[in-house]
Amino acid sequence: MSISGATEGISDLIKEYEASVGDAEVTVEDHHEIAHDMAEWIEKIRTHLSYMSDIITAIKGQAVAFAEQTTEEFTIEDLVRNVDILMKHELSNALINLDKHINMRADAKINGNINSLVQVINNIISNAIQAYNGKENETIELSFYEEKEKLIIKIEDRAGGLPDIVRQKLFKEMITTKGKNGSGLGLFMSYSNIKAHFGGKLTFETETGKGTAFYIEIPLQ
């Protein structure tokens, strides 16, 4: 949509330029101004194409993760970059801020499948966005820190906490936190994913009227 808008802008400038050909009142400065406007639109298109390329690369990695669970070594920095790329659009649309805090070495190594872990983190962030129920300019905190040779990833919202019925069944069956908009697969599968593929744990704390924090705990090398 952004690139389509940019091409319309360039099309308008081309029409303007064609209309100016032979017009004695059009100065050299006017020609330079039109050329400058065209260059600005082209630069915007380059930015959008770069973003699309990042998205496609990340999505291809996610698709491979469904078919093949490869084990690899990656860093906290790699993980944060992939989460950023894939969540940028959803966060922007919801007008929700994602505050990231890396309270450890960004080059710390994790062993496992990065795409699987990105899926788990992004699912929890998506749940938090839904929990705000359309409220704008709210914040989700994403924190990384080390504790007893384990990586702790904390995703926290201030959306009022989980209902009792959800708390009791959250990781035990396919229950959804999203009402009619949820499938119930996300957190159930996330819990299984962290346990099976990373030898880790997924836990949560929630307080009515305040919010919810999920903790992903993974052994570090």
Image: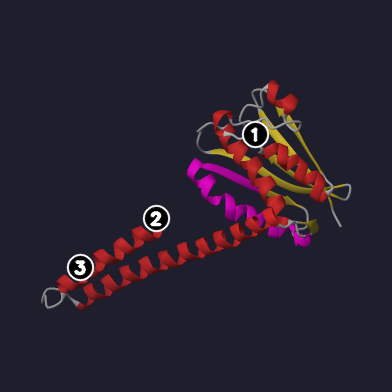
Task: Please say if 160 is above or below 30.
Answer: above
Residue 106 is left or right of residue 184, and the answer is right
- Where is mark 1, residue-wise? 184
- Circle 2: residue type: Met
Q: Which of the colour schemes (rainbow, by chain, secondary structure, one colour) is used? A: secondary structure
Residue that appears at 64% across and 55% down? 62
Question: Which of the two discs, 2 and 1, labels the residue nearer the N terminus?
Answer: 2
Q: Is residue 61 left or right of residue 53?
A: right
Residue behind mark 3: 16
Whole-percent x, y for residue 97 in the image: 56, 43
Q: In this view of the protein, which residue sits in the foreground, 180 or 137?
A: 180
Quarter of the image that includes the C terminus: bottom right
Residue 18 x/y as whole percent: 18, 73
Would you place residue 207 above or below residue 19 in this image? above
Tell me which residue sits at (61%, 35%) in the image: 183
- Tell me where residue 11 sits by quadrant: bottom left
Image quadrant in which you'd find residue 109: bottom right
Q: Which residues are magenta?
A: 71-100
